[in-house]
Image (tube, rainbow, N blue to C red):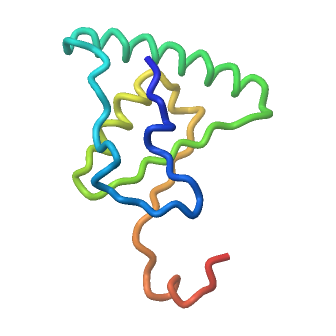
Amino acid sequence: MRINSKDFRVRPGERVKLREWPTTVKPICATKKGYHKLLNEHAEQLSALQQLHYASSHYALLLIFQGMDAGGKDGAIRHVMSGVNPQGCEVFSFKQPCEEELKHDFL
């Protein structure tokens, strides 16, 4: 399963016309059972990669889930991270900055 990310990229300086860009990805599997099988395969692969990264203590993986409220982030995280050992993870939640944080410089 590969999603061609070039379908969703915009070149720097290019003017974006949203009606010309795809908003959905073509279905990868024909059935829900196919998606569950694919999810299990990817969860196993992610688990193996996590063990490799954890053992090497040299690299890390950063996942960012961004979206509107009720955009499906929780469900996506639950499915994607189902094969990962939570002891090897750190989770941070980023909310809207408070008034005091807005007074400070970005960096």
Specify the farthest residue to the bottom: 103
The mark total stands at 0
Specify the farthest residue to the left: 31
In-image side of 4 versus 62 (left or right): left
Residue in front for this viewpoint, 35 or 47: 35
| x then y, percent, for residue 3 | 44, 27
| x then y, percent, for residue 90 | 56, 44
| x then y, percent, for residue 46 | 54, 21
In-image side of 67 versus 60 (left or right): left
Residue in front for this viewpoint, 75 or 92: 75
Residue 64 vertical placement versus 27 (above, below): below
Residue in front for this viewpoint, 7 or 91: 7
Residue in front for this viewpoint, 39 or 3: 3
Residue depicted at 50% across the width and 85% down the height = 102
Residue depicted at 32% across the width and 56% down the height = 18
Residue depicted at 43% across the width and 17% down the height = 1
In the rendered image, the quadrant that contains the C terminus is bottom right
Residue 68 vertical placement versus 103 (above, below): above
Q: Where, by quadrant of the figure, is residue 26 drawn?
A: top left
Residue depicted at 27% across the width and 23% down the height = 27
